[in-house]
Image (cartoon, rainbow, N blue to C red):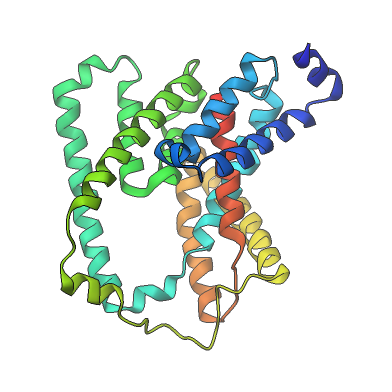
Amino acid sequence: SLGTCFQASGSGLEVVALAAASLASQKLAQTTNGALLGAPVIALTIGAAFTSIGVPAGSAFANAVVFDACLPMAVALVLLGADVRDFERAEVTRAMGTFAVGAVGTVVGTLVAWKVVGHAMGTLGAMIASCLCASYVGGSLNFAACAQCVGLEATEQGGAIVAAAMAADNICMAAFFVILGLIPCSDEATKQDDAPSNSNTDFDENKTTWKSVGTAVLLAIGVSLMSKTLADAAGLGAASLAISAFVAGAVAAACAHFNVSLSGGAPIGDALMLVFFAALGA
């Protein structure tokens, strides 16, 4: 069988299968129907399909590579790709205030919803609610970090539960974005969006080179190792991804100050995140 072939060829092919799932989900997410589901849900589905045909993409070896290497690197690369110099702009400061209100509202709404329907969510309901709340505040990265912190991914049915939660999340958000798209935007808001940036234009951080990609990858490795060391030293091993957010933010700020380009690293981080979701599906 195909599973026997993979076992005979070595565990490395399992990681190759997850990488293939990542690439395929990116391509499928660019289609009309795929965009409704989102790349994470597609990756979860492909991972589940691998298991159904006998490809052991969810083996202990594959999970060790994904959770110990790919996921920390993905978080670091995506966060390093943020242009922290934008925070100097007044409109970004206002947006941060709006985001803070929305984040608090999301947490409060989750607590209220838990009081109303939490009893119907089963023994892992609190974990699921926490991950979904984190997702609505910060997207897939927050979902992954929260799943690690609460130990959802380590439960017996963790992969299946995460897959179902991500599918429900993406379907609901697709409907929500359709509703938002139907709301007309005021002329004043349109003018603000078209306003020129005050960022330093002498340095083109969007120009991707082998040097910028290599720098981003090396720094991401350093951020991952440092975050793991700090988390273990503080007795917070399950919070290493959360700690990496602060470390990566500080490194990104330093790179922006010294005009060090990290362009090209974020897409690699996105691809590694899809490897993580494929592993959950498997």
Q: Residue at x 31, y 21 (%)?
A: 125
Name which quarter of the figure residue 221 lies in. bottom right
Figure check: 58 above or below 90: above
Q: Residue furthest bottom?
A: 202
The quadrant of the image that shows the N terminus is: top right
The quadrant of the image that shows the C terminus is: top right
Q: Nearer the viewer, residue 254 or 53?
A: 53
Q: Is residue 270 visible?
A: yes
Name which quarter of the figure residue 143 lies in. top left
**Residue 46: horizontal and vertical position, in percent?**
58, 27
Q: Residue at x 39, y 74 (%)?
A: 86
Q: Is residue 282 visible?
A: no
Q: Residue furthest front?
A: 32
Q: Residue at x 54, y 46 (%)?
A: 233
Figure check: 90 above or below 115: below
Q: Nearer the viewer, residue 91 or 29?
A: 29
Q: Residue furthest right?
A: 8
**Residue 83: horizontal and vertical position, in percent?**
46, 70
**Residue 58: horizontal and vertical position, in percent?**
63, 23
Image position of 116 (left or right of 241) = left
